[in-house]
């Protein structure tokens, strides 16, 4: 779980644009962020498994 201080800091506008870091809005994780779904890979897997993300299905072959 991300620290609250870092989540609040991420909400502010950075001094330089390149310093902006995408964070998962659900858990605050700064790494493994999926832009298409706007969440981290862990939250994505959890919600996809529960069927809460439309159009995403578990693959099997």
Image (cartoon, grey):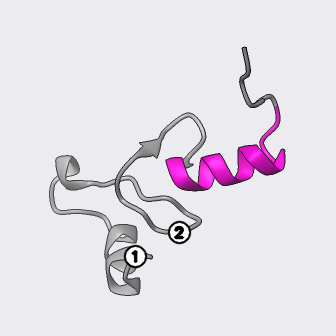
Query: Quick check: 43 above or below 61?
Result: below
Query: Quick check: 46 above or below 10?
Result: above
**If the image is split into quadrants, where does the C terminus sit?**
top right
Horizontal and vertical percent for residue 53?
A: 77, 42
Q: Is residue 19 left or right of residue 50?
A: left
Q: Can you tell which quarter of the image residue 51 is in?
A: top right
The region drawn magenta spans: 41-54
Q: Main secondary structure of the magenta part?
A: helix
In reply to whether residue 20 is colored magenta, the answer given is no
Element assignment for label 2: loop
Horizontal and vertical percent for residue 37?
A: 60, 40
**If the image is split into quadrants, where does the N terminus sit?**
bottom left
Horizontal and vertical percent for residue 50?
A: 81, 51
Q: Are marks 1 and 2 in contact (CB under 8 Å)?
A: yes
Instruction: Give me the residue at 80% from left, 28% from top.
Output: 55
Binning the other alpha carbons within 10 Å of mark 1 as few (below 14), some (14 to 19) or many (20 upward) gives: few
Residue where numbered disc 1 is placed: 2
Instruction: Give me the residue at 19% from left, 54% from top.
Output: 19
Residue where numbered disc 2 is placed: 27
Q: Is residue 14 left or right of residue 1?
A: left
């Amino acid at each position: 779980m991300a620290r609250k201080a870092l989540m609040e800091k991420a909400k502010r506008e950075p001094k330089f644009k390149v310093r902006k870091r995408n964070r998962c809005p659900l858990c605050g994780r700064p790494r493994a962020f999926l832009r298409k779904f706007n969440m981290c890979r862990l939250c994505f897997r959890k919600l996809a498994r529960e069927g809460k993300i439309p159009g995403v299905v578990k693959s099997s072959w």
